[in-house]
Amino acid sequence: MKNKPDWLAWTMQALLGLVVGVGIGLGPCLKRNSWLTEDWFLPYLGGCALLVAGLASYFGDRLWLGSSSYRVIPPDEMPHSPTTRCCSVALGIFGIVLLVRALCGNFGI
């Protein structure tokens, strides 16, 4: 019997990844003299958020807790189906594309 995907867990991990990704993207841009122009700020922020959301929904708790072998109770594996795995990879790829496009557009490449 195949593992059925847990869509609630997948969605919660993706939403947490979006929030953390926005925080990671805002970090370098909070300075007054930021290297990122206003035109490319939202695509850059969206790319960071989608990339971390894709990673979080793919790896689940292992991303946040690590997979150290010295834990008493190791984190559970994220139950995936081909659909959830494809959705996670698509989120990550779309985030990378947005991030690269924003950085290339910002620096005039």
Image: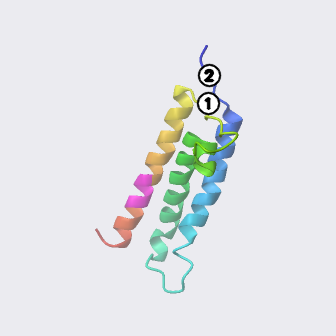
Task: Give me the disc on residue 3.
Answer: 2
- The answer to if 79 sits in the magenta stretch is no
**Front residue (pair 53, 39):** 53
Measuring 57% from the left and 49% from the top, which residue is drawn there?
Answer: 53
Rendered image quadrant of residue 70: top right
Mark 2: give few (<14), some (14-19) or many (20+) Cα within 10 Å.
few
Rendered image quadrant of residue 78: top right
Coordinates of residue 34 in the picture (x, y in percent): 48, 81
Task: Give me the disc on residue 79.
Answer: 1
Q: Dot 2: what SS?
A: loop
Measuring 48% from the left and 64% from the top, which residue is drawn there?
Answer: 44
Q: Is residue 52 left or right of residue 109?
A: right
Which residue in the rendered view is the most extreme toward the top? 1
Q: Is residue 100 left or right of residue 79?
A: left
Placement of the C terminus among the 4 image quadrants: bottom left
Q: Amino acid at mark 2?
A: Asn
Number of callouts in the render? 2
Which residue in the rendered view is the most extreme toward the bottom? 32
